[in-house]
Amino acid sequence: MTKRAVLLANLGSPDAPETKPVRHYLNQFLMDPYVIQLPWLLRRLIVSLFVLPSRPKASAEAYRSVWMEQGSPLIVLSERLTQALQQQLDMPVAMAMRYGQPSIEKQLLALCEDEAISEILYLPLYPHHADSTVTTSIEEARRVIKKHQLNVQLRVVQPFYDHPDYIQTLVKSAESYLQQDYDHLIFSYHGLPESHVTKLDESGAHCLKRNDCCESAHAAHKTCYRHQVMRTTHCFALQAGLAQNRYSVAFQSRLGRAKWLGPNTEDRLVELAQQGAKKVLVICPAFVTDCLETLEEIAIRGKEVFKDAGGESLTLIPCLNDHPDWVSLLADWCKQK
């Protein structure tokens, strides 16, 4: 009989909200060729000359503003999710980070200490496909298995951006916020350079080449981040009964000078305030766990931007984190797989 284990994977976090560990983390993250998709030497020059000299100090300050007593929010909340999921499954469950600790390598080796485990269900916690999240996580797991000659089969759970149960869980987690008095809801997704999207379109003639590219059926949608976030938004709005003029999509967390998916979330917040919106909600479905990008970039900086532009209040709808329905859904997927 096949003995299975579950390995969840997320992006990662620095070990501490200080300049040195943040610099180490950013170096590991940005030198990943799936993140900055340039030749190694050019990538090295950009990271060493333009990012690492100044960004770690600023990022450390941002991390300190949201750091929890137990540690990084992403790590702490991920551990809670892992523990809650373990209680619903009769197989080992672990959580790994693509960058930082606990690493994918460390967690795979720990799981495989039990030689009876012959199959690992690998679940990258990203609803939408992107090479900089999903692909790099999968390739790292495969690298570790090959390097250490681990006798296990890796079964990967694919992005679940429009899975009906995921949409239902996401809507339910936001219900109490949607019942509040608000003017507009922003779906703020993590940004991505446009080149990351067009590169995966094998036809070279669909993604971002026409205004309705995300609505017109095409084989590229299987790996198109923009299509998938638009699909999540559409399914959520339909399930929640949102009027089309009550919500919009924006993208956050830009880095560098390349052209990124737009509109930018902060620009959208300013625009809404100038149009008279006083109360906005922001939900970040690209993340299943609250982290720097949601807790600091949206709930702190985004709120300041909105208020400075004339708005009154910005409320961040929490990520799924360890919401009971999310834990139950993950458990169901693990049992089905």
Image (cartoon, rainbow, N blue to C red):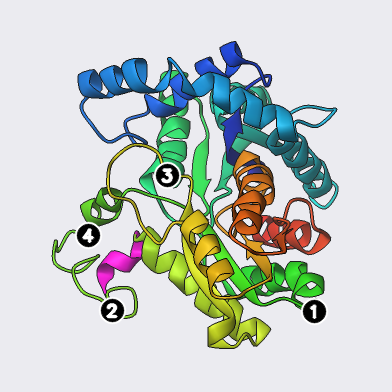
Q: Can you tell which of label 1 and label 2 is closer to the viewer?
A: 1
Classify mark 3: residues with Cα within 10 Å, few (<14), some (14-19) or many (20+).
some
Q: Earlier in the sequence, mark 3 or mark 4?
A: 4
Residue 138 in picture, x, y percent from top left: 44, 40
- Residue tagged 3: 254
Between 95 and 75, the one lying in front of the other is 75
| Image vertical order of residue 252 relative to residue 53, above or below | below
238 sits to left or right of 230: right
Above or below — where is 286 with respect to 6? below
Q: Considering the numbered disc 3 on the image, is that residue within a helix, a strand or a loop?
A: loop
Which one is earlier in the sequence, the residue at label 1 or at label 4? Answer: 1
Q: Which residues are magenta?
A: 217-223
Q: Alpha-carbon distance for marks 2 and 3?
A: 24 Å
Q: Which mark is residue 201?
A: 4
Q: Quadrant of the C terminus?
A: bottom right
Taking the magenta stretch, the answer to whether it contains residue 315 is: no
* Image height of 154 relative to 97, above or below: below
Numbered disc 1: secondary structure: loop
Q: Amino acid at mark 4?
A: Asp
